[in-house]
Amino acid sequence: MSPTDIETPNRHLSGTPLSSYDLPDEVRQGIADAGFVFATPIQEKTLPIGLAGRDVAGQAQTGTGKTAAFLITIFSRLLRTPAREPRRGPRALVVAPTRELVVQIRNDAEVLGRHTGLSTLAVFGGMDYKKQRDLLKKVPDLLVGTPGRLLDYEQQGATSYRGIEFLVIDEADRMFDMGVIRDLRRILRRASP
């Protein structure tokens, strides 16, 4: 995957250099692979908060670096926080409204997380159901999926959301518009300690 395949090529020449953030070397390597040099405005606002371990809510146009912001935060925090063992489910969960967005997030995660040793799995409709369920047995560190598929696998016992340390709801407004808020609420209840 080339740097321009990731959500937003980092072409603007101003902003905070990403090298100035306290990030693990493995994450820095992924950022370099993606061709990012400077933080975008949404990244400048959210990275310091997320990297400090606090909750973040952000809204920005498509292509402004939101996905990279939450992936950089997730990978950095996962690398710096030992996993609780044994795990039945992912440590980080990203819920997105559409298959296309799930695939894009997974692709971005593969670039940014390439050197971390952390595993990512995407689940969504239209793909081999059993194959995805079998891949969940490997207990990925990061699971990305659409609400219906995520809920279905959890209800079947193929995974658990009880150990979720990081949760991202991407394009929540779109999920409201699509009428999947009930599924999202069920996932949130299951992710509660």
Image (cartoon, rainbow, N blue to C red):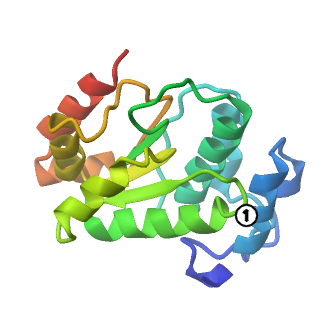
Relative depth, front residue between 129 and 126 = 129
**Dot 1 alpha-carbon crowd within 10 angstroms: few under 14, some 14 to 19, many 20 or more:** many
Looking at the image, which is closer to me, 177 or 23?
A: 23
Residue 164 place in picture, x, y as percent:
44, 30
Give the residue at x 19% y 60%. Answer: 130
Q: Image check: 135 left or right of 41?
A: left
Q: How many marks?
A: 1
Q: Is residue 26 left or right of residue 134?
A: right
Image quarter where the C terminus lies is top left
Residue drawn at x 44%, y 39% is: 90
Q: Amino acid at mark 1?
A: Gly
Q: Tell me the quarter of the picture where residue 3 sits.
A: bottom right
Residue 34 versus residue 137 in the image, above or below:
below
From where the camera sits, is residue 87 visible? Answer: yes
Instruction: Label 1, secondary structure: give it.
Output: helix
Query: Can you name the residue that lies furthest to the top here?
Result: 193
Would residue 16 be visible to someone looking at this image?
no
Q: Which residue appears at 25% of the width and 33% of the height?
A: 187
Residue 151: name its quadrant: top left
Q: Position of residue 65 (x, y in %)?
A: 58, 61
Vertical arrangement, residue 184 with respect to residue 33, above or below: above
Q: Which residue carries the number 1 mark? A: 30
- Left or right: residue 193 compared with residue 8: left
Image point (70%, 53%), residue name: 116
47 relative to 125 in the view: left or right: right
Which image quarter holds the N terminus? bottom right
Give the quarter of the image for residue 30.
bottom right
**Image coordinates for residue 69, horizontal then vertical, percent:** 61, 51
Residue 149 in percent (x, y) is at: 20, 52
Above or below, comparing residue 57 to residue 42 in the picture: above
